[in-house]
């Protein structure tokens, strides 16, 4: 966008209150980034691989910057600062729960989730300053995703999505049963359905690993049971 136009929009909107979508997305982002600061800070205290450590530093700095920016924004809008995660939620001085490559995979999944979340938020944003913030977040997630892909690939651990044969001809859907959830007729999975399933598997494996690890260091039986329930759900 032309900088003069952007400047005019910001001037026009300087007293405009956040809309419901902007407030909701920013609130959720604050909670997410305070969590990432805690997790990545713990990872940095135990990581051994130098290349993965640099990746973690970059991710940690991005999340910390987001927290600082959002804190300033909420304060300027006279909105209560959300109660996010903090030092009180990190059990320091314990042995490493994860190996280094898992930490890189965590950053990779975090970047993927961030890109989807920020891109979706952009469609509901009207204030120019919020749009600029989320647009930067998309670019940061893109950069973090590319960096983490390269790191994991160099460690020979990058999981490629399933490969399917190229189509040999163009086919058209000619029966409603193709998309009907009540049809008894099954059709081969489409490439996008395979992609969605792969994403669900990746997310559940990551979540299961995290919850299984947290269950080993939880300080109460109630928390341990909660994490074990999560492990069972992810496995299912």
Image (cartoon, rainbow, N blue to C red):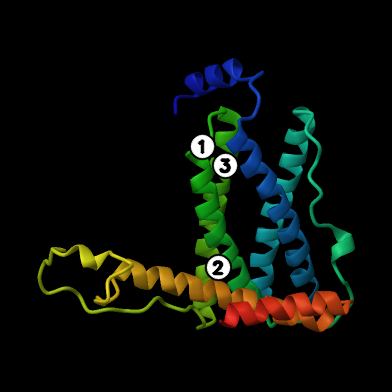
Badge 2 marks a residue whose secondary structure is helix
Residue, disc 3: 134
Q: Nearer the viewer, residue 44 or 187?
A: 187
Q: Residues within 10 Å of mark 3 (few under 14, many from 20)?
A: many
- Describe residue 79's horizontal placement relative to residue 170 as left or right: right
Q: Which label is found at residue 124?
A: 1
Q: Position of residue 44 (x, y in %)?
A: 76, 69
Q: Residue at x 56, y 81 (%)?
A: 236
Residue 50's spot in the image, x, y percent?
68, 75
Residue at image mark 2:
148
Q: Is residue 148 left or right of residue 61?
A: left
Q: What's the CA distance linking mark 2 and mark 3?
A: 21 Å
> What count of labels does the image hold?
3
Which picture quadrant has residue 14?
A: top right
In the image, which is nearer the foreground, mark 1 or mark 3? Answer: 1
Horizontally, is 192 left or right of 116 in the view?
A: left
Point 42% across, 77% down: residue? 160
Front-lying residue, 73 or 44: 73
Marks 2 and 1, the one that precedes in the sequence? 1
C-alpha gap between disc 1 and disc 3: 11 Å
Secondary structure under the numbered disc 1 in the rendered image: loop
- Give the quadrant of the N terminus: top left
Give the SS element for disc 3: helix
């Amino acid at each position: 966008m032309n900088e003069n136009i952007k400047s005019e929009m910001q001037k026009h909107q300087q007293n405009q209150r956040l809309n419901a979508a902007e407030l909701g997305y920013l609130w959720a982002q604050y909670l997410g980034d305070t969590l990432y600061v805690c997790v990545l800070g713990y990872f940095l205290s135990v990581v051994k691989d130098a290349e993965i450590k640099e990746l973690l530093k970059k991710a940690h700095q991005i999340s910390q910057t987001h927290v600082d920016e959002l804190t300033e924004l909420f304060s300027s809008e006279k909105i209560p600062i959300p109660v996010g995660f903090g030092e009180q939620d990190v059990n320091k001085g314990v042995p490493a729960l994860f190996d280094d490559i898992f930490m890189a995979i965590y950053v990779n999944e975090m970047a993927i989730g961030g890109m989807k979340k920020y891109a979706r938020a952009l469609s509901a944003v009207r204030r120019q300053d919020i749009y600029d913030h989320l647009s930067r977040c998309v670019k940061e997630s893109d950069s973090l995703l590319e960096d983490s892909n390269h790191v994991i690939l160099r460690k020979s651990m990058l999981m490629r999505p399933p490969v399917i044969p190229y189509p040999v001809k163009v086919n058209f859907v000619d029966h409603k049963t193709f998309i009907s959830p009540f049809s008894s007729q099954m059709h081969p999975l489409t490439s996008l359905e395979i992609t969605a399933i792969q994403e669900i598997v990746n997310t559940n494996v990551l979540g299961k690993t995290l919850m299984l690890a947290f269950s080993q260091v939880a300080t109460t039986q109630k928390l341990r049971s909660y994490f074990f329930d999560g492990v069972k759900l992810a496995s299912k």
